[in-house]
Amino acid sequence: MVVEHTDTAPGLAPAPIVVASNRGPVSYRRGADGSLVPGRGGGGLVSGLSAIGLDAGAVWVCAALGDGDRAAARRAGRRLDAADTGGHRVRMLDIDERTFAAAYNGVANSVLWFVHHLLWQTPLEPSFDADFRAQWAAYEAYNTAFADAIAEEAAPGACVLVQDYHLTLVPGLLRVRRPDLRIGHFSHTPWAPPDYYRLLPDDVAEQVLRGVLGGDRAAFLTRRWAEAFAACCERVLPGAEVVREDGVATRVLFEGRETRLGVHGLGADADFLRERAHRPDVEERLAALRRQIGPGRRTIVRVDRTELSKNIVRGLRAYQRLLEDRPQWRGKVVHIAFAYPSRQDLPVYRDYMAEVARLAEEINSTYGTADWQPVALQMEDDFPRSLAAYRLADVALVNPIRDGMNLVAKEIPVVSDHGCALVLSREAGAAAELGDEAILINPYDVEATARALHIALLMDPGEREERTKRLAAAATALPPARWFLDQLGAL
């Protein structure tokens, strides 16, 4: 049934464009005096929404993620104060805290993230029991809350852009509520191949696909992930037909509807990064890093959230192997490893972070000397420090097990001061665009990664500089604003 829109109060008019994502463009914390202090959200989506302009009348629907957000959402009612959001119209959903936790941690981050990144240890996991079914019910309720809010916010015929694995059911739910809308879903993660995807319970695997196919368009970061989605539709949904043109999957036909498939690779925001990387706070951290590294030493840089998919432990083992097998690098290279906390409310992530710290300490205690620390590990989030490390990098190590894109691989060449060699996992989406100029590796092969680091460290400075120029050009070909507008235009 189409919702009637009778609320025309100033600032609450129905929106011709609605963006929906778990995380919004603003977050709140409590100040020392108990007041709510807003802060700008990060990521390409914030830049993307800014590209359409405040006069476009777009509304962003997001979830309250913490106590500060929930208090702000309750205080605001339907929309947040525009003074907090840079003028954007934002509806933050105050979803029951237990429902949110079960949907976000129990399903989105512990099941859907795991299946698409191929992370399960299958002799032990997954095990879909009664607890999972309760969590899945919460995921359904969470998606329903978004669908209801979008249906209320969207003007007749509006474009709705639904983001990521948190909200896979929303397009289908919204199609029932508002058949007049043009709905797109974008997946920021990889998509699992059919055999692995079918580890999910049959009904859940089908429900997720049906949800995404409720949209007019399903889009992905690379052609590889789009093809995997199409293959899952063929294998899991009885009667689903994939239309291919010149061997490329372009549409999925299912139960009388057509969903077009699209690919939009997200690039780095070059103007922002280059300007931000030369501000005083970055210069200060750059000087500190240079003092820590010492004169004349090469640098291998990695900057990641400590997520299981980022493969930090194998990266450290590869560096350890480099020092074992190539003693000429001892005292001559420092591995700058920034591993920032992620999902620390999940025990498996806390354990992984502890293993990263343990292995870095083992390398330092085994090979370190009075004037040389082989691994410079930092585990406190610090964006200016990350940019300083980008500028210093002789070698960038980006070795995820699997990644939808990986913006670090694109950002480092953009801000590198003197050119860097990129050692890149072939399982990162970025490999499709950067592979010709990078040294590609199998992320599971520690020995091959160690050899790649050696080759990268030996690369001629002139060749490294030329490769970096080409990497930067490819990395910035589709900046966040254009990436967002292309999705909107395709609807």
Image (cartoon, grey):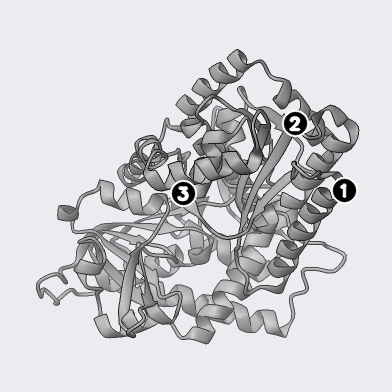
Q: Is residue 450 above or below residue 138?
A: above
Task: Determine whether, in the image, residue 376 is placed left or right of residue 24.
Answer: right
- Residue drawn at x 66%, y 68% is 110
- Residue drawn at x 46%, y 49% is 384
Given the current orientation, which residue lies at the most extreme front position?
Answer: 370
Amino acid tagged 3: Pro
Residue 384 is labelled as 3
- Which is nearer the eye, 268 or 51? 268
Q: Which residue is mark 1?
A: 366
Q: Position of residue 359 (x, y in %)?
A: 80, 55
Amino acid tagged 1: Thr
- Residue drawn at x 38%, y 81% is 70
Label 3–label 2 contact, CB within 8 A: no
- Which is nearer the eye, 49 or 29? 29
First-in-chain label (3 vs 2): 2
Q: Which residue is mark 2?
A: 332
First-in-chain label (1 vs 2): 2
First-in-chain label (3 vs 1): 1
Inter-mark Cα distance, 1 to 2: 15 Å
Task: Determine whether, in the image, residue 364 is placed left or right of residue 342.
Answer: right
Q: Secondary structure at mark 1?
A: helix
- Which is nearer the eye, 66 or 460? 460
Inter-mark Cα distance, 3 to 2: 25 Å
Q: Residues within 10 Å of mark 1 (few under 14, many from 20)?
A: few
